[in-house]
Image (spheres, rainbow, N blue to C red):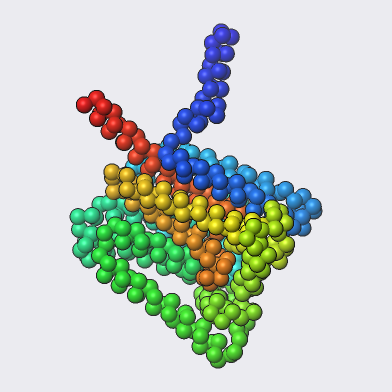
Amino acid sequence: MEATRDIRFNELKNTFNTQHLLSKTKGDKVIWALVVLLTLVSLLAVYSATGSLAYKNYKGNTEVYLFKQVAFILAGIMVIYFAHLVNYTFYSKAARFVFLLSVPLLIYTLFFGVKMNEGSRWIRLPIINMTMQTSDLAKLALFMYLARLLSKKQDVIKDFKKGFLPVIWPVALVCMLIAPANLSTAMLLGASCLMLLFIGRVRTRHILMTIGIALIPVLILVSAAVIRHKADGEIVVTKKTSGTLTARVDTWIGRVESFIYGTKEDIDGGAYQTGQAKIAIAKGGVFGVGPGNSTTRDFLPQAYNDFIYAIIIEEYGLAGGAFIMFIYLVFLYRCIRIFKRCPFAFGAFLALGLSFTLAVQAVANMAVTVNLFPVTGVTLPLVSMGGTSFIFTCLAIGIILSVARNVEQTEGKAKEKAAVA
């Protein structure tokens, strides 16, 4: 009896040992390595960027946010691991349901969501009492659903009614629901989707027509910023009504005006943020001031989140900033390789679409930091301080690795058949 119990205990122990987990880990090994690299960078950057904040909020305990980040990273790695074990065809089956779930959640968030920074972007999750950006779920759901539609519509994709309209309306719907509270996310999501549609053989004139329509409100926004600047000579700080569309439009105009004219003040401090980011970059130089030696973190709002790239450059210099950019480029390149190797359209479009949105988000975050783009509020994937956005990023990477794992299995079976023949 005892011998049988010992055998079962040893079997259970072997099931959960590291070697067993590694043997079960499949997919693109380079992407796995990049994930580990980015999470290590995240630990160092978040710990440095939150030191003063933790000291202030937790009475000298500067490790609080570090431990939280470790917890999010461990949870994220587990999400990647289990998501990559699922056959990617399951995501095709779940795509429609998840998309239909995300739409009412976006509507609910728009009207009843938690209001922060004059916009309703979050809903509060019961029991765990955490906030979640429903746009993160919507982005994932949209790319799953779009990949499914593109794979099924390839025979008629050139036709406007049968091919283009069915794939563009989900994009338009989700972007319009996200835009009132988070215009930058909606624009980046729309750009990523149009890139995927171009790869998916949608007619170029249909894509250009969509871009032309989308540019109309952007041009109106830029014109409003120019007109207000000329009329007032400086940004007018107006009293805003929290959560109203008028307040959000006022914020958008202020950010555009600040970006174009480099004003010292704006409605929500965007110019101040970019100014402090420039100071951090200037201090960093080529090789940086060293890990943990940032001083700008005490003055830069969202240094651990939206502007964490500035802290990385300050501490590790332009060399460190270029290395982070290189990691994201390699990640995109490996995903493109998966797209080319995948024999099935859904998996190919799914991997490419999710990689596009992560790469575009990373580029946008870095562009804001160096003042090449107006302040957006998007995070640096896998590097910014953890939250539900971090978990959804990990889920997207897990799905990409699921496609890569199945590609490897298909190629392995093909080689075995060739060897037997």
Is 246 on the left or on the right of 161, as rendered? right
Q: Position of residue 308 (x, y in %)?
A: 61, 59
Taking 316 as reference, is 84 above or below it?
Answer: above
The one of 189 and 340 positioned closer to us in this rendering: 340
Above or below, 275 against 294 in this view is below
Please, is residue 152 above or below residue 267 in the view? above
Quarter of the rendering occupied by the N terminus:
top right
Q: Is residue 1 left or right of residue 343?
A: right
Asked if one can make out residue 6 in the rendered structure from this viewpoint, the answer is: yes
Name the residue located 35 percent from the left edge and 75 percent from the top edge.
213
Q: Residue furthest right?
A: 59
Image coordinates of residue 411 in percent, x first then y, are: 31, 36
Tell me the quadrant of the picture where the C terminus can be found.
top left
Q: Nearer the viewer, residue 416 or 348?
A: 416
Which residue corresponds to the image point at 49% horizontal and 84% vertical from the top-left?
A: 224
Across the whole image, how many numbered discs are drawn on residues? 0
x, y percent for residue 405 = 39, 38
Query: Is 218 left or right of 68, judged from the image as shown?
Result: left
